[in-house]
Every structure is written in C-alpha cells, then in structure tokens.
Image (tube, helix red, strand yellow):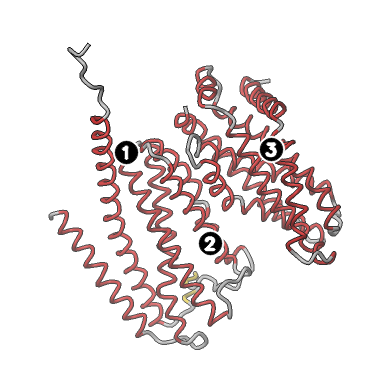
Amino acid sequence: MTQFWRQALAIVKRDLIVEGRSRETLAVVLPFAAAAVFVVPFATDALEARLSTIAYPVYWLVALLFGMQVALRQTGVESQAQRRQLSLLGVDPVARFAGRVIAGSALVLLVLAVTAPLIFLFYNPEAIPRPWTMAGVLVLFALGIAMLSTLAGDVTTGLAARTTLASLLVVPVSVPLLLGAAQTLESLIRGRTTLPWVLTLVITDLVLAVTGVLTARSLEESNT
Amino acid sequence: MNRSIARATLGSLALIAITAGLWLAFMSSPDVFQRDYVRIMYVHVPGSWLAFLAFGVTALASLAWLISKRMVFDRIAEASAEIGVLFTTVSLLTGMLWGYPVWGTFWDWGDPRMASTALMFFVYLGYLALRRAVSDPTARARRSAILGMIAVVQVPLVYFSVTLWRSLHQGMTVRPDGIAMDGSMVAALLVNIAAFTVLYAYLMVERTLLARLETETAVVETELAGRSVERPNLEGLA
C-alpha cells in the first residue's frame, strides 16, 4: 500500500473512532432523520395513495439534508491544533481530503440505509425493480455529498456562522447529485434508461473529486 | 486623462447607451404572438448575458488571485460577483414578468433555464455570504477564490439547459443557420446588450474602487484600535 493510502486510511480510522466514541450520528442525527420521515405525513392528509407518491421525494430530501448534516459535522470535529499537527507531520492534504471523504461517505450511507426501510414502512412506495443498481447510485450520491460537505466545511472552517453558511453553500450545488439520484430511481421504476442520470452522478462526483484534489493544499494553507 | 474624468465619461457613456437601448426597445416592432410583452426581452436577455459575464469574470479573477496573490484580483472578483447577483435578479424578475402574460404563470418548473438560473443565484448569494463572514482579507480572498472557481460550473449548465433538457424556454435565437428574429428586434437587442455591457464596465470600475477604499479604511481602523489598546506606561509608579 502506498504512503498516500496509508495516510488516507489513518484519517478514515481516526474519524470513525471519533464518531464511535461520540455516537452523534447514531444517537442524534439518525433518530432526528427518522422523526422527520415520520412527521411528514402529518403535513398532508395522509391518504395512502398520496403518501405513496411523495415517498421517494421525502426520502431524497431527508437523505440530502441529514446526509449533509452528518458530513458537515464530521468535517467540523477537527480542531486547528489537529490540522497543524497533521501538517507538521507531513500528511498529504490530498490524503486528508480523501480520508475525510471516505469516512463521511460511510456515515452518509448509514443515514441512507437506515431511512430507506422507514420510507417503505410508513409510505408504501412503488417497488424498485433493480435494487443493486440503486445501491450503486446511493454510493455515488453519498460520495458526492461527502465531498461537497468536506469542501464547504474547509472553506468555512473557523467562522462563527460556519454551520449555516456551509449549508447554504452545499444545498444549491448538490442539485446535480439530487437530480441524478432521484431521476435514476424514477427511470428504474418507469422502465426507462438510467444511463444519462448515472452519468450525471459520475461526472458530478468526478468534478468534485478534481476540485478537492486541486484545492486541498491551498485550503490547508488557509486553515492551519 | 484624469481618472475621475475617465470615470465620469464612462458613466455618461453608460447612461447614453442605456437611454438609446431603451428607446430602441420601445420603438422596435411588436411580436406577432407576444405583442408588446416582447419588449421585456430587451432587458431580460442583457441581464442574463451580464450575469454570465460577471460570474465568468469572478472565476477568472479568482484564478488570477490564486496564481498571483494580488489583492486587486480579489476586489475584481467581489465586485463582479455582486454585479452578477444584481443582474441575475433582473433576469429572474423580468423572466417572471414576461412568463405570466405569455405562459400564464410566473414560475414554471418545466423550464430548466429558470430553475438553473435560480440555483446559480443561490450559489452566488452563498459566495457573497462567505465573503462577509471572513474578516481576514487574505483568508477571505483564498476561500472565496476557491468557491468562485467551483461556482462558475453553473454558468454553462444554465446556458445549455435549454438544449440539454426539454424546456418551455425559447431556444437559441442566434444559430449557425441564421437568426430567428426580425431585423429591428435584432438591432434593439444588440444595442441593449452593448449598453448593458458598458453599464457593467462602469459599475465594475466604481465597485472595485469602493472595495479598495473599504480595505484602506479597515487598515486605518485596525491601526486606531491597535493604538487604543497599547500597554499603559507605568514607569515610576511602582
């Protein structure tokens, strides 16, 4: 294994250990997401036919907002002293970016995996014909949200309004991810080709990855 | 030429050009189907063009800052983003005003150009919010330069949205096979685009100058605050 991936995996391990100790995603964000899925029917007349039509839009909205919250929180746990230490130890900023994105994606996937059965339980949506294709789409979506949140987290590090500002930066830019994931699901259900929407997701992920790699050093310079 | 005379000349030129453009807009022939509502286009299209131009300039100035670290590029990026947001607002509002009588609705989700323009507007609002949240000039310049380069991806997305997705929005008027418009309309549109571009140039000069003055004022204020918290002279009191 190369030095780069050893460093990246060390960052992944560190972030997941921090999450394991604080349990903020498991104990706070996931119950909050579950509660959000549960309360939406109270805002409509809760007829089964209507709930069935809004099931997937509710899922994507919850996935976006809570996934973003998890990924942003996870990028915010690193203090300036820790960042300086990593910099002095010679940890490659790109490896740091990769490590944080992988850990963030794992947590976002956890949110997606926990909320999906709740949607099926409470909303009775149409069945998904090829669930494995959808699983791959969820991985691409989680990667994109994690990369976007990591970038927004880095750009807003140390600011008083970090939480709200980072969300404002993430939500409009996440639209290609949301569009790609939601339209792939819609195309699967309607029996249409999914290729253009999967490509939208892949291209958006690639653009975000390239941006992250190109700006990692500059952002580290700014944040240490 | 003295700088203030040059600025005044550019301002006067912008005023004359805008007046001429609006006069042509009211004098040009009405559309067969849209009737007089077509005149909204003479403000809507230049507004959209300036939004694209302004955000493109923001991205280029951001890149120039990342390479050279010269603060003038940061000021250009800021000024252009602010003007871009202003003209995106003009474009969105005029589009909605035109949409109501012609399409029967102010907002149509079936039009990807409208939706993507609104998204671009929010992205640049985020850019401006980020600038206001960072107080250190170098950190502000670096962070906003990175965001300015990411955000520009929206511009081609908005421009090509009418060809990428099925849309209610009018397609490209100027195409390789010709112009799908009456001559007087084309003339009025081109004059207005040119006039709004001169206005953009004038606003850029004024806003960049203001940004420089803001920086200089911030330095003076920091120095004053620094002096007021100097350690008191206690010599001879112990």
**B161 or A218, which lies in front?**
A218
Q: Amino acid at mark 1?
A: Arg
- In the rendered image, residue A46, in percent from the top left (x then y), is placed at 81, 64
What residue is drawn where x is 62% and y is 22%?
A: A7
Give neighbour class at mark 3: few <14, some 14-19, many 20+ (Cα, 10 Å): many
What secondary structure is marked by label 1? loop
Residues indicated by labels 1 and 3 sit on the same polypeptide chain = no
- In the rendered image, residue B177, in percent from the top left (x then y), is placed at 50, 73
Give me the C-alpha separation between circle 2 and circle 3: 28 Å
Task: Return the chain for callout 1.
Answer: B
Give me the C-alpha separation between circle 1 and circle 3: 37 Å
- In the rendered image, residue A153, in percent from the top left (x then y), is placed at 55, 38
Task: Return the chain for callout 2.
Answer: B
Q: Which residue is mark 3?
A: A105
Horizontally, residue A202 falls left or right of residue B14, namely right
Q: Which residue is mark 2?
A: B118
Of tags 1 and 3, the one toward the viewer is 3
What residue is drawn where x is 37% and y is 36%?
A: B138
What secondary structure is marked by label 3? helix
